[in-house]
Image (spheres, rainbow, N blue to C red):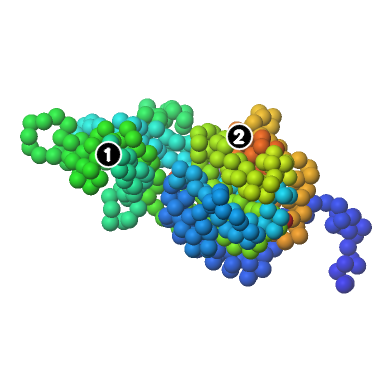
């Protein structure tokens, strides 16, 4: 080749020794991009029916059943290729495909979370002020509070009545239904508010949600607007005010996922963190044939508030399921875990050119750069993280290179710029090799987050490749 002869000695040495700059979507063939676009149509559909964890579990369970998965029965005998699922309290689901070697060489885990930041109702939420009916909320997860005002909100969740009956609520998603909103002060009168730092301008106790404004009737009773709302709720759900005590009701943005950009390369939606990893994880489990080792995609809850509780990753639920599988193979749990590997399937911050100074560009992840391997998260000098080993990083890197999956490394912003964590450290504590691998997200935790279609598809390819190992 004539061009090669012209290369200088330095150019040739650089080619041999220096890390190649990831070329992102530029390096992808048209067919791959088309497949990514097609895959993301399924993702957008998944998103519309999976805004809160119970709904995500139901959607995943429905997909699993359609793909031949049956509910796990601890007393049954399973053979390689059998597909089972387990559900924990309606908020976790595990999809397992039994491998040729069962659990003898450990299991392969892909774990994503299906809870996202939102506004939860307080136990005594309904009140009237200034002739308006309102909900009091307590925000869930890390939010920038000002972003949650003046956004159309839908109410999702479950109410358990005193008679033991439960009602699943979903109001505001259909455009023919009403939705809800947190008000904000007009700019004409915000001089005092505008002078405050951003974190103080909108307080948690100001995230009150407008739910009605008409009085019940002309009787001389107090709080007629609130009464009218209680009456509507009684007629619709058979609930009284006290039933809010035994309810889990969440306000989430009321809009559907939308393509972003003239080229439609991106998707804007509520809750990409972390359904953008949950969906590819589910699809990888549905599409695997008979793996070598048993594979499990697990969708967990409570990640955004510290993974506590019996549906969070600090719960023993997943471990006890793996223990059941291990015992069926005559194995001890601890021996299975020691040989198990996990991809903690979670998102990382995509480089934002408008806020470039928050990032360290050589170690940031980029939209269209492919899946991100995040070796460690945490803050304050790698505090609060499991920090994957060189050996495990090497194994995952080789897997991605061998399969020609577009990938990049990522760090959560510049050193001491802030920080955060994932479920990786809880999985590592089981004595499992684990690293974070997921999708870059722009405007993470905002009511409308942005991801790239190519990256979502690369996550699917990565999880599928992992399940083959
Ligand atoms: Mn996350
Ligand atoms: Mn998050």
Task: In this rendered view, identify the residue nearer to me: 113 or 201.
Answer: 113
Q: Position of residue 111 (x, y in %)?
A: 59, 47
Residue placed at 67% from the left, 49% from the top?
Answer: 329
> Along the horizontal axis of the image, is 201 left or right of 325?
left
Residue 419, labelled with which disc?
A: 2
Distance from Cα at disc 1 to Cα at disc 2:
45 Å
Viewer can see residue 125: yes
In this rendering, the answer to whether 313 lies above or below 258 is: above
- Residue found at x 57% / y 58%: 83
Q: Is residue 128 left or right of residue 2?
A: left
User: What secondary structure is found at the residue carrying circle 1?
Assistant: loop
> Residue sitting at 51 percent across and 54 percent down?
71
Q: Which residue is the extreme one toward the left?
A: 219
Q: Residue furthest bottom?
A: 1
In the rendered view, does 50 fall on the left or right side of 346? left
Q: Nearer the viewer, residue 229 or 416?
A: 229
Residue 219 lies left or right of residue 438; in this view the side is: left
Quadrant in which the C terminus appears: bottom right
Point 34% across, 47% down: residue: 168
Looking at the image, is 404 positioned above or below residue 181? below
Q: Label 1 CB, ligand 2: below 8 Å?
A: no
- Labelled pair 1, 2 in contact (Cβ < 8 Å): no
Q: Secondary structure at mark 2?
A: loop
Residue bearing mark 1: 163
Looking at marks 1 and 2 on the same chain, the residue that comes earlier in the sequence is marked by: 1
Disc 1 versus disc 2: nearer the observer: 1
The image position of residue 174, as x and y in percent, is 32, 56
Category of crowding for the residue at label 2, using alpha-carbon neighbours closer than 10 angstroms: few (below 14), some (14–19), many (at least 20): some
Q: Quadrant of residue 201?
A: top left
């Amino acid at each position: 080749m004539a061009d090669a002869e012209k290369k200088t000695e330095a150019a040739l040495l650089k080619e041999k020794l220096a890390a190649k700059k990831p070329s992102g979507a530029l390096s992808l063939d048209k067919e791959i991009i088309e497949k990514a676009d097609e895959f993301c149509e399924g993702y957008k559909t998944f998103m519309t029916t999976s805004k809160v964890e119970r709904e995500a579990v139901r959607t995943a369970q429905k997909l699993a059943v359609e793909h031949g998965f049956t509910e796990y029965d601890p007393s049954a005998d399973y053979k390689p290729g059998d597909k089972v699922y387990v559900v924990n309290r309606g908020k976790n689901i595990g999809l397992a495909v039994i491998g040729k070697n069962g659990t003898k060489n450990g299991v392969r885990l892909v774990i994503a979370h299906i809870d996202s930041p939102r506004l939860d109702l307080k136990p005594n939420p309904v009140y009237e002020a200034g002739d308006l009916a309102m909900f009091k909320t307590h925000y869930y997860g890390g939010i920038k509070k000002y972003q949650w005002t003046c956004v159309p909100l839908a109410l999702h969740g479950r109410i358990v009545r005193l008679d033991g009956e439960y009602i699943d609520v979903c109001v505001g998603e259909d455009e023919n239904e009403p939705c809800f909103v947190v008000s904000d002060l007009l700019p004409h009168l915000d001089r005092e508010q505008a002078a405050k730092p951003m974190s103080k301008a909108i307080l948690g106790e100001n995230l009150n949600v407008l739910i009605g404004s008409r009085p019940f009737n002309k009787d001389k009773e107090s709080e007629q607007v609130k009464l009218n709302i209680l009456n509507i709720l009684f007629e619709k759900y058979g609930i009284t005010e006290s039933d809010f005590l035994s309810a889990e009701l969440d306000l989430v943005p009321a809009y559907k996922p939308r393509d972003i950009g003239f080229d439609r390369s991106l998707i804007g939606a509520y809750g990409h963190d972390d359904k953008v990893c949950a969906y590819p994880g589910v699809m990888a489990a549905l599409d695997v044939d008979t793996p070598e080792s048993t594979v499990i995609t697990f969708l967990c809850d409570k990640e955004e508030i510290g993974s506590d509780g019996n549906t969070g990753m600090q719960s023993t639920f997943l471990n006890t399921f793996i223990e059941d599988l291990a015992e069926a193979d005559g194995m001890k749990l601890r021996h299975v875990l020691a040989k198990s590997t996990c991809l903690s399937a979670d998102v990382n911050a995509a480089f934002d050119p408008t806020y470039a100074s928050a990032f360290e560009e050589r170690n940031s992840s980029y939209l269209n750069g492919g899946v991100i391997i995040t070796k460690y998260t945490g803050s304050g000098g790698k505090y609060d993280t499991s920090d994957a080993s060189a050996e495990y990083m090497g194994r995952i890197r080789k897997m991605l290179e061998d399969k020609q999956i577009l990938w990049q490394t990522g760090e959560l912003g510049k050193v001491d710029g802030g920080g955060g964590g994932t479920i990786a450290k809880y999985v590592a504590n089981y004595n499992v090799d684990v690293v974070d691998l997921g999708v870059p997200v722009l405007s993470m935790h905002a009511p409308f987050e942005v991801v790239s279609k190519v990256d979502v598809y690369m996550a699917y390819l990565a999880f599928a490749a992992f399940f083959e190992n």
